[in-house]
Image (cartoon, helix red, strand yellow):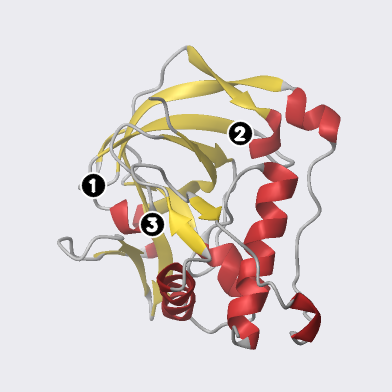
Amino acid sequence: MLTRKQHELLTFIDNRLKETGVSPSFEEMKEALDLKSKSGVHRLISALEERNFIRRLPNRARALEVLRMPETTAKLPSVQVKVPPAAPQAANENVLEIPLHGRIAAGLPIEALEGHSSLSVPAALLGPGEHYALEVSGDSMVEAGILDGDYALIRRAETARDGEIVVALIAEHEATLKYFRKEGAMVRLDPANRSYDPQRYKPDQVRIQGKLAGLLRRY
């Protein structure tokens, strides 16, 4: 029998896949299960994978597949998981054109290039607000499922909370995609790759330009 948390997570993933066709992020899973850290999510995912309830799809970000649900669901404890409402069906069928602004570093900061291209994105991947896309360059966010060549879908924002993945403009001319954190009087931009070190800046050196809303990958 699954533990309560394993069952909650499996139910959450299964519901999200049925509603949107997209696996929830580790941050969403952490919040849905009221866990203190993403390491707890990793342990639950590994346990479900070892017991053949789910599998990770290779070479795809945030890609999980539910292989089966527990056969004795009636005997499992009741579960209340905070599942965000799915987008309306009409929105799922729409495709939106959003601006595509060059490449952004997921490693060392590089200059953010403004372009005049656009990217077709399923409306179901976007929530409210104004969005744009950036092509990811580098490998420092691979442990968050963000790979070189992916398209990061960004919701415009000027502020962020600790732990959110943001587009940070550094010194008004370089941009990077990183986890945002406050560290005393400094701003720390964390990679999701153990091969890279965090970057620290004074607050007036960093300007938030948006928060990660989704990913698009072409094959």
Mark 2–mark 1 Cα distance, whole angstroms, equals 23 Å
Pick whichever of labels 2 and 3 is earlier in the sequence.
2
Q: Label 2 vs label 3: CA separation? A: 20 Å
Residue at point 57%, 50% (across, down) = 158
Kindly identify the amino acid type of the residue bearing the numbered disc 3.
Ala
Quarter holding the N terminus is bottom right
Picture layout, residue 105 above or below residue 49: above
Answer whether labels 2 and 3 touch (C-beta < 8 Å): no
The residue that label 3 is drawn on is: 144
Horizontal relation, residue 184 to residue 201: left or right: right
For numbered disc 3, what is the local secondary structure? helix
Given the image, on which type of amino acid does mark 1 rest?
A: Asp
Q: Which of marks 2 and 1 is nearer the N terminus?
A: 2
Q: As rendered, which of 35 and 4 lies closer to the eye? A: 4
In this rendering, position of residue 99 left or right of residue 127: left
Report the residue at 55% width, 60% height from top: 160
What is the CA distance from the residue labelled 1 to the residue labelled 3?
10 Å
- The residue at the far top in this view is 116
Helix, strand or loop at label 2? It is: strand
Q: Where does the image place residue 163, in percent across and percent down from the top left?
A: 48, 68
Left or right for 143, reference 16: left
Inspect the image, locate mark 2, and give the three-letter code of the amino acid beneath it: His
Report the residue marked by disc 1: 139
